[in-house]
Image (cartoon, rainbow, N blue to C red):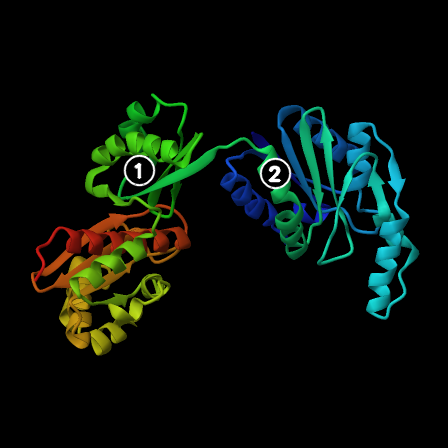
Amino acid sequence: MNAEIIAVGSEMLTPERVDTNSLYLTGELNNLGVEVVAKCVVGDHRDRLAGAVRQALARSQIVILSGGLGPTEDDVTREAVAQALGRHLVFCPEIADALERRFAQAQRKMAEVNKRQAFIIEGADVLPNDRGTAPGQWLEESGSVAMLLPGPPHELKSMFERQCLPRLKCLAPQQAIRTVILRVAGMPESDLDQLISPVYKKYLNPVTTILAANGEIQVHLRARCATEAEAGALLAEVAAPIELLLGDRLYSRNGDALEVVVGHLLRDRRATVSVAESCTGGMLGERFTSVPGSSDYFVGGFIAYANAMKVELLGVPPKVLEQHGAVSKETAEAMAAGARRRTGSTYALAVTGVAGPDGGSESKPVGSVYIAIADDAGAHTEHRRFLGDRQRIRLFTVQMALDLLRRRIAYSRPA
């Protein structure tokens, strides 16, 4: 079974509002083995919405509309769906009476306009709203189902769980949708696709999606089968050769973020880490401490932005700064060594670079960064030049620093 979700409301087409209801609904539908094949946002325009509903019902067996069930003139979902199905709206006195009682309990007089919420599409089942005033509606049309749900998330979630899920469980065939997320560092998207496409192109199921963001690639394998066991077996069949091709560039097989993976490695080795940051200004430390329980392995860090702070806080020799500059291999290694010396951590990471948009030179252009790691075996430095704006350069730098530590821990012998 396939489903489509339509979010209703002109406010959802502005930069101030985000449609979060569709994320919740997608998760619930996937748990039933229902694939969401399309989502859209339609403003408060009856004809446009009616057209979107007609198209969705022609393509999919389940269509869910969220929003537009309020009492005001711009709440057009009831009228639009009735128009799309060629049905009449019928006034329901029982709903109007229930609304009046709800207002009376709050010691308020119900406005006449609230009676608009008592109009039900001909043939629809009413879905009671235990969290608000707008009742939902369940309609069946030519083998498809349409659900009209309120827009406020707390109302929608309660109505869907109480009123819709039991019906859908009876309606939806037994299926399972399961996903494996492989996360890869240190590899361009095009190179990764060229490497693994001979594997995934053999399969229409699972569906493969490749996503790139902030210095990492995610490979999503999504299987749809009759049972969870079949979905799991199919995912394992496709993922295994892909994992072999990716090798040590693959850092997570369950979707865990890089900072989580690094944290597990540090905890397993009973090791600690500290950071010394210049161009990233605390972003690296934030990634470590965003993980619950990171106090087990993260000692602390230094934001040594100015040269004077590099000398005072980390003990970077002034001669190193004079001879090589703040953005250099020598300074990065001195920062890492200083952080490790001052904190007593097992590992220390240091980052220094030119994040831009200004400050670059011919020898050290914007995007040039040095990342150093220090431990008992000494110091090692990686030099990269990242392209993009200031934020992108800093995000890529942090991601690379975490991956450098991951590789150092994973491929070194335990003490």
Callout 1 environment at 10 Å: few (<14), some (14 to 19), or many (20+)? few
Q: Quadrant of residue 240?
A: top left
Residue at 82% from the left image edge and 31% from the top image edge: 83
Of all residues, the one furthest to the bottom in this rendering is 312
Residue at 74% from the left image edge and 50% from the top image edge: 128
Quadrant location, the C terminus: bottom left
Residue at 77% from the left image edge and 49% from the top image edge: 135
Q: Give the image location of residue 213, x and y in percent.
A: 39, 45
| Local SS, label 2 | helix
Q: Which mark is residue 188?
A: 1
Q: Give the image location of residue 200, x and y in percent.
A: 33, 26
Tell me: residue 63, above or below residue 267: above
Identify residue type, mark 2.
Leu
Closer to us: 233 or 187: 233
Residue pointed to by mark 2: 168
Q: Which mark is residue 382?
A: none
Q: Give the image location of residue 261, x and y in percent.
A: 27, 54
Q: Is residue 324 visible?
A: no
**Do the residues under discs 1 and 2 have CB atoms within 8 angstroms?**
no
Q: Is residue 257 visible?
A: yes
Closer to us: 132 or 396: 132
| Local SS, label 1 | loop
